[in-house]
Image: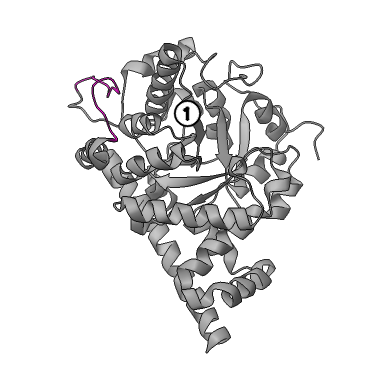
Amino acid sequence: MFSRTLLERLEELCNIDVDDVDTELIRSLLIKPHNQTSNQAVIANALFESQNETLLADMVEKYGKEGWEKVFDNATVQMCARNVPYLSGHVLVQTSPRHINDRTAIIDQCYSFAKAFDEAGVPKDRFAIKLPFTGSAASAAVQLNTEGIRTLATAVFGLEQALAASQSKCLFISPYYNEIAAYEDVSLRINNPDPAMNHPMSARIIHMLEAFAKEYAETGTEQPVMVIASHFGIAEIMAMPELGCHHVTIRADNLRALMQTPCTLPTLSARHAKPKHPYAEIATPDRLRCLSKLDPLAGPNWDGILASSRKVDYVANGGEALDNAIHENPVMNKRFKDAMELFLNAEEKARVGIEKAIAKCWG
């Protein structure tokens, strides 16, 4: 192993989160990660691995008569709960994509998660719940955050979702730097040595961060902490501190690559150390300020006007304004739908496997 790796350098610049539930992976890292996230795809893949065979059997025996969803959700909590000792922050679970337009169902599932975490001995300040961020989710988040069940706005692709996350007092926000479709179609990937400047999503990240910094400066109200996800390779990950992201959540393959790469590659980040507060000290680097007025994803007919929380209440009336914004924005609409399709397919894979286990256990 090298005396100094890119993983260690990145941890000096921003907080590293793990996009996986593999305990051995987390324990093998050269740094203590902050948060561990999960989603339906991560859990569906992990649940049927040999190391989780006993866990699945236990969950089926305990919850199988209540249905596959109860087994799936409690197995999710158990796989995350066991990682708490190896983290400095939170473990995160995600509500079902089947509930994205049902505020009551979102809240009920979050209550169920909170109960399961409590039974697993995980206090409220060590877990948070990811909500695929529609109007219903934003409206639900208002109530949940008020009650001390902290939330993360996920599958975020535009400024309107970020403003709704601020208005609903989310603890975290997780934009996807790359769209889900790019994982299947390599032609959609952005191959550029300077992603901070040239990746089309960079401008939208700047818009979100500047909006949060402005709101914090004017009101003193804490804003959602940026936990950016969905990167292709080291160059994109190492560009995140320069953009101003306080956390970066990293998949297992990229974590291993960062651990295996010596800290000799140049980094574009102007930071020398991570900021103590995500927004009190943040300022867009001079070379990226042009992105504040650009939006390459908006198309040629964009009027140059950015969404504003001063003009629109995105969580009122069940999040009606946010749903309208997603529906009317082709990029947000398609990318959000693609993400939900991925998670729905993962849930279906889990349902089939769990129901087979239930039938075997209970006849």
The x, y position of residue 309, in whole percent, is 30, 23
Coordinates of residue 356 in the picture (x, y in percent): 50, 81
Q: Looking at the image, what colour scheme do you see?
A: one colour
Residue at 54 percent of width and 51 percent of height: 38
Q: Is residue 118 visible?
A: yes
Locate residue 277: give its quadrant: top right
The local secondary structure at tag 1 comes to helix
Give the vertical position of 253 relative to 162 (above or below): below
Which segment is the magenta one? Answer: 303-315
Tally the numbered discs: 1
Q: Residue at x 59, y 74 (%)?
A: 62
Picture quadrant where residue 270 is located: top right
Tag 1 residue: 195
Against 105, is 318 above or below?
above
Q: Which image quarter: residue 116?
A: bottom right
Q: Is residue 314 magenta?
A: yes
Looking at the image, residue 52 sits to the left or right of residue 146; the answer is right
- Point out residue 176 in the picture as x, y percentages from the top left corner: 43, 39
Most common SS among magenta residues: loop
The residue closer to the viewer here, 333 or 60, is 60
Residue 100 visible from this viewpoint: no
Q: Residues within 10 Å of mark 1 (few under 14, many from 20)?
A: many
Does the magenta-highlighted stretch encompass residue 20? no
Q: Is residue 50 above or below residue 138?
A: below
Q: Amino acid at mark 1?
A: Pro
Q: Is residue 1 left or right of residue 299?
A: right
| Residue 98: image location, x then y, percent | 35, 59
Task: Work out which residue is located at the far top of the displayed protein and give it.
Answer: 286
Q: Quadrant of the N terminus?
A: top right
The extreme front residue here reads 147
